[in-house]
Image: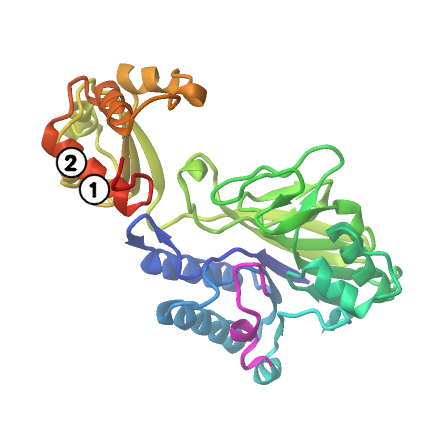
Amino acid sequence: MKMMHIGDLHLGRSLGEYDLKDDQQYMLDQLLKMIDDRSVDAVLIAGDVYDKAVPSEAATMMLDYFLSSLAKRQVYTYMISGNHDSDERLNYGSGLFETNRIFISTKYEGKLYKKTLKCENEEIDIYLMPFVKASQVKRYHPEKTINTYDDAVRAIIDSAEIDPSRCNMIVAHQFVTGKSDDPDLSGSESLGTQSVGTVEKIGYNCFDLFDYAALGHIHSPQQVGRKEVRYSGTPLKYSLSEVNREKSVTLITVKGKGDVDIELLPLKPMRNVRHLKGKLHDLLDKSNVTDPNDYIYATLTDEDIISDAMNIFRTVYPNTVKIDYDNSHTREVEQVDISKIAENRSFDDLISDFYRQIYGSEISDDEMDVMREVAREAGVLHEAD
């Protein structure tokens, strides 16, 4: 039996000011082609289906297209909500969807959602665990001590009375850690002491009863602890930090209890995300220009700030997302100890020093007036200052 594990689609996402609708549609079509080419029986979608709790019309239409395409192919689909999704919106129509082999779980209500997938002589028990908070789990299991998210997940799994003799799989949207290391992070994820985003850490051994754990939430494809506990990662690059990461989709072949093969199928985006660094003249030299329609982050090493650099860059690379500088001025600023920089300094002094560091010249009176006005609107500067 062949199953495709995907997650973190973030339908409706933008990159800077660029709407990724066409890129995401291209990605969905590529997934459908892989499903056809590999004769996939089921698809596991591990949360963060939408990028926002209130998705755009275009995002909902893309999901409708994808699920309808899977239904037409008679592919079984198992989908959960992530922390970016609205439980109600993603769950809408779930009862009707089940008649088309689409099973959705968006809210934990005291029992782990379970469906048994039967294909020829094989049976797999598939459990769906959407994004939950420990407080939600406490409500249904007051008899258990639940102080951490790890406690909550273990309480959910323990109460499911999973038969270890059967082939079991789970789809979950959690921040799962390995024996000693945290997963590799990218994009909008921020690693704190206990969490990424709003999801507390749990140990990968929570899923010891499962032959495969299809995880969502972390944007880099990777295994955690053992090869059968895995993040699919995002199908597209959604930030500068992902420029050097290759994207893939996970194909799982289940041959029986404890016999799971994992293959990573590479994904090729319609437009890549790249980082270019160098002098403006060199980067825009025709002999150096490749794939001009890619999404570009550019770091200029020119010593002088170039007026209208973004519009100049977009004449060659129309999908330039951001431009910054790396030169002697910016490096000097990075080395400044800012811990005491504001002590006994006026607003004008601070702004003048900053302007001098960046541009190598004095700020004009008109420019200072603009800065004061912006500071007042932001509440940083008051009329008496």
On the image, the x and y values in percent for residue 114 come to: 74, 71
- Based on the picture, tell me whether residue 57 belongs to the magenta stretch: no
Say whether residue 257 is left or right of residue 42.
Answer: right
Q: For mark 1, what is the residue? A: 373
Q: What's the amino acid at mark 1?
A: Glu
196 or 342: nearer the viewer: 342
Determine the residue located farthest toward the front in the rendered image.
384
The spot of residue 247 in percent (x, y) is 48, 45
Residue at 51% x, 74% y: name it: 89
Residue visible at 51% across and 62% down in the picture: 49
Which image quadrant is residue 113 in? bottom right
Amino acid at pointer 2: Asp
Answer left or right for 133 relative to 291: right
Stretch in magenta: 81-94
Q: Secondary structure at mark 2?
A: helix
User: In the image shown, does 51 or 32 lie closer to the viewer?
Assistant: 51
- Left or right of 301, for residue 218: right
Which label belongs to residue 76? none
Q: Is residue 107 visible?
A: yes
Estimate how packed mark 2 is, as few (under 14), some (14 to 19) or many (20 or more) residues with alpha carbons within 10 Å: few
Asked if disc 1 and disc 2 are in contact, CB closer than 8 Å, the reply is yes
Question: Dot 1: within a 10 Å radius of its alpha carbon, few (fewer than 14), some, or many (20 or more) residues?
Answer: some
Res 162 seen here: no
C-alpha distance separating marks 1 and 2: 6 Å
The C terminus, quarter of image: top left
Q: Secondary structure at mark 1?
A: helix
Vertical position of residue 31 compared to residue 271: above or below: below
User: Which residue was labeled with disc 2?
Assistant: 369
Please, is residue 151 above or below residue 328 in the view? below
Q: Residue at 17% of width from left, 41% of height from top?
A: 314
